[in-house]
Each structure stands twice: as structure tokens, then as C-alpha cells.
Amino acid sequence: MAIIKAQKTTARAAPLSETSVVGWLHKNLFSSVFNTLLTLVTLYVIYLTLSSVFIWGFWDATFVAENRRECFNNSLTGACWAGVIDWFDNIFYGRYPRDQIWRINFGGLLLALWMAPLWMGRVNGKVLIAVSVIAFYPFLAGYLFAGGSKNLFLQIMVTGAIVAFAINMANMITGLTRRVSLNVFVIQLFGKTSAAEKSQRNLLLLLAGLVYAAVFFWQMSWHVEVVNWTKWGGLFLTLVISGIGIASALPGGIILALGRRSKLPVVRVLSTGFIEIFRSVPLITVLFMATTMFPLFMPEGFVLNKLVQVIIAVVLFNACYMAETVRAGLQAIPKGQFEGAHTIGLGYWGTMGLVVMPQALKHMIPNIVGSFIGLLKDTTLVSIIGLYDILGMLRSISKDVPWIGLHKEPLIFGAILFFTLCFSMSKYSRHLEVKLSAGNKH
Amino acid sequence: MTSVTSQGQLASAASSEVIIEINQMNKWYSDFHVLKDINLTVRKGERIVVCGPSGSGKSTLIRCINALETHQEGDILVDGILLGQNLKNLDHIRTEVGMVFQNFNLFPHLTILENLTLGPIWVRKMAKAEAIETAMMYLERVKIPEQANKYPGQMSGGQQQRVAIARSLCMSPKIMLFDEPTSALDPEMIKEVLDVMVELADTGMTMIVVTHEMGFAKTIADEVIFMDEGDIVETNDPAGFFGNPQHARTQKFLNQIL
Ligand SMILES: Nc1ncnc2c1ncn2[C@@H]1O[C@H](COP(=O)(O)OP(=O)(O)OP(=O)(O)O)[C@@H](O)[C@H]1O
Ligand SMILES: [Mg+2]
């Protein structure tokens, strides 16, 4: 016998427990006697902790003082932030000459401006912008921070960086104001819209060449005061090391991962060996090796400064970890994607660059950012081998005569700083993931 | 404009010019002998349907033709080019031979239009505007021009398969290979894909189709090939193949699927 429902059921509003705040509280926090008790105890514990942190860190704390004695005179139970504030410049810039600090800030500003178009929906050519920043910015920044005389190679790269930066900014402006990329704008300016693509490209290359030559002659006369790397320190040094690490770990990791999957046995064995060796040694060991053993393998009279050695070590170490992340991402790409690319005639690099990597990288974003966060935090290990990065600086506050014995506050300040940096990176990665997966669910 | 004979069959477009020639070809997967002494001649414009039980080597055969797999013995000549170790030849062959897979294998991170223009722009070095124009023309032909800016994941299986066909056609191939193009589709979508394939056959494209869609095979095939355990067991015209199969294994197979 068939059972038939004659009336269509009309939709009703959801019960209160699903929609109102009170309903939610009742359902989740106060549903039973035991649950209520648990909620109250937890609330009390949270209150105790937060209130004592607040009293120590803010209510009873001293923000202005000449030395630690004055802090104690002011309050025995509060934090002494005055010491941290007094050391702000050291914490951020190390012993960089105070009248040259603008160079660091300027370098940071350039980087921010350079990368800003990456977040602008209207601007085209994002891949080129990202590549140009990795390829050129380090040379410009390195020259800006270190100063001194520049050899021909550095001059070429610095000029390249300035031209790339200028093109990038001009492209951003035409993109924002006219919604066209710079090359289209220039072509229109010269009224060559109907010309063949080849002659258009030649015109653009000629213009870029002229700009390059002009900038090259201009920069030849620049003199930037030398600041020895031993004066670099604080958050600045931490960001230099981890920044270079981050910028080169991903390309390095991609190359190593592709090497590990290569069909050529020599390439495969070398990549695998390299990756496995670095992955089975702790970073601190690699750092010690780099600074003490590395010079032994170098030819007589070949001296690299400690900072360069440390950076090389950090880069290699992280490239190896990144290689495994990338490899995992590559393995997640179904075989059909390679075959699809094959049938439209793409070769190895086309398949990897246009089809496989874009998908793999997207899947890997959380892992990649995870490694970046790890890298930023691991950089503090360089303080053990005697570089005054941010951790080194924070710890030397307690050895400074006026602030002798001040351990807690600097380290807590450092923790807050790291938390802010790392947490925003992780939030941003989450945001990226959501944004990138919005368009194309599988 | 589809020219159909009185039996509902598409008129043959086969010319006398040979475009694929396979000679005593053998293939092994390590020591498993998948393809045994394969001989096959395909003329330009000819449409061949391949069928046979699962694991008989149908996919492997057509994958050898566009160099997705390498064979160990014998010769495969495609459009006058001998498939062998020479990588330059492989690149050329892959742009001449289009292939459509059971699982579409569209690129999920690209829009439909980008899927279609990727090959023309990067492999054929076509100007972007021209590539887009060609892509739209083929989307028109597979009847989904309005979906150009969607992502593959936002489309039905039948639509995705039609995009996959259009993607291959954008490379203007001389030969199209189909590996069970409808077997991952829901029944109501099979027809829309088969219709597109019949129209393609009508344009005179050389096609090799692995399929068990017997109605479709009867409509377009010039020749039906039956494979079993790596052998080409029977080659016949569609009427003979379905009406009067010669080989015992063919008869058994047809009894099972009809
Ligand atoms: N990469 C491989 N390595 C080893 N054996 C394989 C591989 N690919 C296929 N085979 C085997 O080769 C035989 C033929 O496979 P093939 O995919 O060509 O069959 P098919 O006729 O297309 O079957 P189906 O109808 O299931 O698609 C099967 O026994 C299969 O297990
Ligand atoms: Mg198959």
C-alpha cells in the first residue's frame, strides 16, 4: 500500500537554541549541572590569570625610568617596561649607526611599495612583480644596508632593481587610474596600437633600455657610507636572515623537489642525498658547521663573513625542508593532469610551470606558510653563535649596567613581537587559502 | 547537414591516404605482455571503434599512438613520423594527435577559456586574441560558449567532457583519440557528448574511439576492432561485427553486453 503525504510542509523558523545568543549559551555552556560548574570554574581561572597579568604588566608597571632601581622604587610588583623602551632602537636596529637608520626604514618602505601591487585587484602582471622582487630587491637592499663601493655586477643589479621598481610603480599607477598595464599604456601613448606585436615589443625594449642606461649613469656617482655587518642586529637582522631564507627557500625547494623526481639518475641521487643530509641534522649543527667547518673547505685566503655563512646555512637548510613540502604537494596532483598537459603538447617545463606547480602550490600554502613561520622563529638560533639578532639584543638588556638583571620583560616583549608576526602570517595564509579555493572547488 | 545513409549510418570520410600505421607492435609492462603483435592501418578520415573486455589493452593501444606510453617492439608510424626514442618527434606527435580521457583531465585551476587557450598560446605560440577567438569558436561547436569563464569544477560531467573535446580541437589535431569518453558520465549526459562526437566525425576527422556505446559505434564506425588479452581478435565493419561476429570470443563478449 502506498503512503502519500497530501500537504506540502511549510518551512518554519529554527528553534531559538540555533539562532539567539542566550540559546547558544544555554545549549553549549549551561546544559547540565556539571557543564555549568565546569563553565564557572573555567571562567574563574581565566579571571585570576588575566587580572594578575593585567596588574603586573600594566597597572603596577613602570614605563618611564632611568634605570632598574627607579623601577623598583616606583613599584616592586609591577613590570619594568622602561628598560625595554630605553632599548627600543637596539631591539629593532641593533648597533646600526643611529644617523643611518633611515636606510633600514627606507629599504623596508621600498619593499612594501614593491609588493603592494600584489594585493591590488586592478594591477596586472603579478607573477612578474613577484619574480622581480626576488631577483632584484636583495641586491638593492644589500647595497643600501651595507654601503661601500660597488663592483660592476652590483651596479648592474642595483640599476636593474631601480628600473624594475620604477616600472612596477608606473604599472601600478596606470593600472589603478586607467585599468591598463604599463606596456599597453605606453603603446597607446605612441599611437602604435595597430602595429605588429613585434614592433611594439621592440619599442618597449628600446624604452626600457634607455631608462636603464640613464639610471646606470646616475647611480655611478652614488656613495653610501659603509656599515659593517657586525653592527647589524636586532629585529632588522632577524628579518634580513629570515627574509632571505623565505625568499630563496621556495625556489630552492622547488628545484630540489623537481630534482628528486627527475628521470636522470645523477640529478635524482644528488638531490635526494642533499635533502636527506640537511634534514637529518639540526639547524644549530648546520649553523656551527657553516661558521667553523666551512672556512676549512675553502681555498686559502678566501674569507666569507660570518653573516654570509649563516645566511647560506639557513637558506640550504630551509630549501631542503621546503623541497619535501613541495614534493608532497606534487604527489597530490593526479596523473591525469600530467597526461592532459601532455596531450596539448606541453613539454616538461610547460607542464610543471603552467599546470602542475600552480595547483600544487595552492594545496601547499598552509604548509609553506607553516615553514616560513618556523623559519622566522628558528632564526633566533643565530644568537647562539654570536650574532646579535633580536633574541641576542633582548638578552643583552640584562647585561646593560642600568638595567642589570632585567630578564623577564625583554623576553616577554620578544614573545609578544614574535606572536604578532607569526600569528598574522598564519591568519593571512588562512585568508589566502579561502580566497584561492573560492573559485574552483574540485 | 549530417549525411546519414538509409541504415542511420554516417557516410564514410575515409580517403586512401594512410595516417597511422602500426606494424607488429608489442608492449610489455615489466614482464606482463599487454599488446601482442598489433597490426593496424588507419586511413585519413577513417573512424575506428575499439572494444573489448576490461584489461584487454584498449587504453594502452591508443596511448601508444600519442606517445603517452612507449612500446618495445615493432613500429608505429603516425603522420609519417616514426615513434621511437626521439623526443623531438614526440613533441610533434602530441600536437598532431588530440586525446580525450574518461576523466576529462581538465585543469581545475584555470577557467574553461584558459584551459582551451593554454596549448595554442604556449605550444603553438599563437597570439592571445587569436587563441581566444579559436577557443570561442570551438566552444560554440560543443554548444557551451556561455560557460567560457567558469571553472571546470562548476560544470556537469557532460559539459566538462565537451570542454575536453574542444580543448583538443583547439590544437587543430589531425587525429583524435577517445578513451571511453562517456563511461564516467550519468546516462542523461552521455547523449550530449556523443552528439558532439558524431558532429566531429561528420567533419571528416580521423578518430579512434574506445567505447562500448554500440549505437554510437554503428553510427560512425568504418571499422570495429575487438581486442582480448592484448590481441586484436577481430576486425570487421559495424554491420558484420554486431550482426554476424566471426570469432567465438567476440560472440561471447557481445552476448554479455547486449
Ligand atoms: N602502468 C601500468 N603498469 C602495469 N600494468 C598496467 C599498467 N597500465 C595498465 N596495465 C595493465 O595492462 C592491461 C591493459 O590495460 P588497459 O588499461 O589498456 O586495459 P583496457 O582494455 O583499457 O581496460 P578498461 O576497459 O578497464 O579500461 C591491464 O591488465 C592492466 O592491469
Ligand atoms: Mg581503458
Image (cartoon, coloured by chain):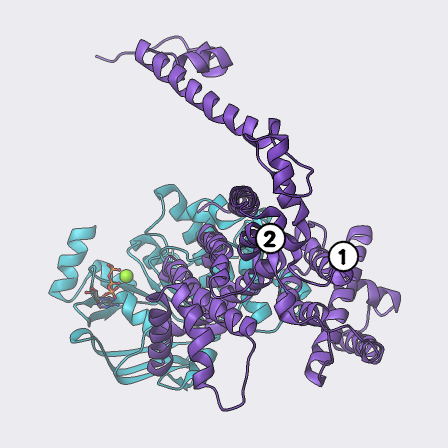
Chain colours: A purple, B cyan
For the point 76% across and 63% down, the residue is A100
A195 relative position to A290: left or right:
right
Vertical side of B47 occupied by A122: above or below = above
Point out residue A56 in the picture as x, y percentages from the top left corner: 55, 30
Residue that extends furthest to the right in the rendered view of this protein: A190
Q: Amino acid at mark 1?
A: Met
A194 relative position to A355: left or right:
right
Which numbered tag is attached to residue A172?
1
Chain letter of the residue carrying label 2: A
Q: Quadrant of ligand 1?
A: bottom left
Q: Amino acid at mark 2?
A: Asp
Q: Is residue A438 visible?
A: yes
Point out residue A426 in the picture as x, y percentages from the top left corner: 51, 46
Tell me the quarter of the picture where residue B125 sits: bottom right
Which is nearer the eye, B256 or A106? A106
Chain letter of the residue carrying label 1: A
Which is nearer the eye, A393 or B57? A393
Give the mark, 2 or 1, whose residue is nearer the N terminus.
Answer: 1
Tell me the quarter of the picture where residue B69 sits: bottom left
Which numbered tag is attached to residue A400?
2
From the viewer's perspective, is the residue at label 2 or at label 1 nearer?
Answer: 2
Point out residue B43 in the picture as x, y percentages from the top left corner: 39, 77
